[in-house]
Amino acid sequence: MENATRMRLGLPDLGVGIGLRIPHYRHLFEHRPRVDWFEIISENFMVDGGMPLANLERALQSYRLVQHGVSLSIGNTDPLDFGYLRRLKALLARVKSPWVSDHLCWTGAHGLHLHDLLPLPYTDEAVRHVAARARVVQDFLEVRLALENVSSYLTFTSSRMTEWQFLSAVADEADCGILLDVNNVYVSAYNHGFDPEAYIDGVPHHRIVQLHLAGHTHHGKYILDTHSDRVIDAVWALYRRALGHTGDVSTLIEWDDDIPPFEDVVAEAEKARAIRMEVARARAA
């Protein structure tokens, strides 16, 4: 256990969680079902008051919450937005999240927000740029930052390394964590024609502090990362492979569109829990 904790950068394994989403609030607050933890979208609660914070406090009464952001834009060339970071840190003081995650991407430029998670060129220059910004963010927040691989639909001709080499280099140089989205690995591998198992095998496993699982929408020529369905068998297989490298690590089921009843999302979490137990038994043997 001591070695497992060290390999997780000193961060705990929280078990299997799900995203905290508005359609489930009534069920959660009336019945308080057993869930290991919930992930919140940070920006939804970076406000001064009102119902978002009231609901956040109700959730905190019963559950461990972890912050996940969508607007850090760590790959942007604009200066870091310290107004945003101060609001993020204020939320952190309320939530006591053990780490804070966001995406390895850029979301806009020159003050314009594109409301999308856009991929970066995989170059040494981009590694240095992103890692320097990540170190500043991590130092400012005073908790571990975890960067998530995004699903992508285009690549840059200037790239000089694979996506997983880029993610690995950024995490190592920034000394930050990785939120490995297994579904995003599968989606991008299909869209760009690379081997998803090579991706899973190729990242620094001791830096993986969290795993994401989700469903997607298959359009034949390409896959969209919609978080609108159950996890498919091929993604579950990649999850098993990742756990084979990492051992138990905090796992999150994402379901953000066409959100079903709470019980359906929990059923996906139970599948993840069963696989964790299966892999743990195999590792012990």
Image (cartoon, rainbow, N blue to C red):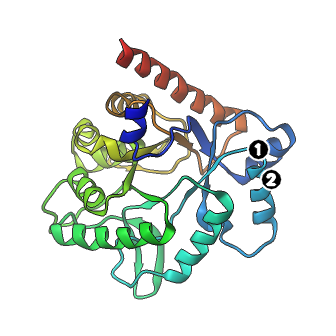
The residue located at (29%, 49%) in the rendering is 191
As drawn, the label of residue 62 is: 1
The residue located at (39%, 30%) in the rendering is 247
The C terminus - image quarter:
top left
Compared with 79, 181 (above or below) is above
Position of residue 66 measured from the top left corner of the image (x, y, whole percent): 59, 52
As drawn, the label of residue 250 is: none
Q: Farthest residue toward the left?
A: 160
In front: 115, or 140?
Answer: 140
- State whether residue 104 appears in this view: yes
Q: Farthest residue toward the top?
A: 285
Q: Quadrant of residue 147?
A: bottom left
Residue 32 falls left or right of residue 283 = right
Residue 29 falls left or right of residue 133 = right
The residue located at (54%, 26%) in the rendering is 273
Image marks 2 and 1: residues in contact by CB distance under 8 Å: yes
Position of residue 139 measured from the top left corner of the image (x, y, whole percent): 43, 69
Separation of residues labelled 2 and 1 (CA atoms): 7 Å
Q: Report the residue marked by disc 2.
A: 58
Q: Amino acid at mark 2?
A: Arg
Compared with 94, 140 (above or below) is below
Q: Amino acid at mark 1?
A: Ser
Secondary structure under tag 2 reads helix
In front: 42, or 183?
Answer: 42
The residue located at (70%, 73%) in the rendering is 47
Callout 1: 10 Å neighbours few (<14), some, many (20+)? some
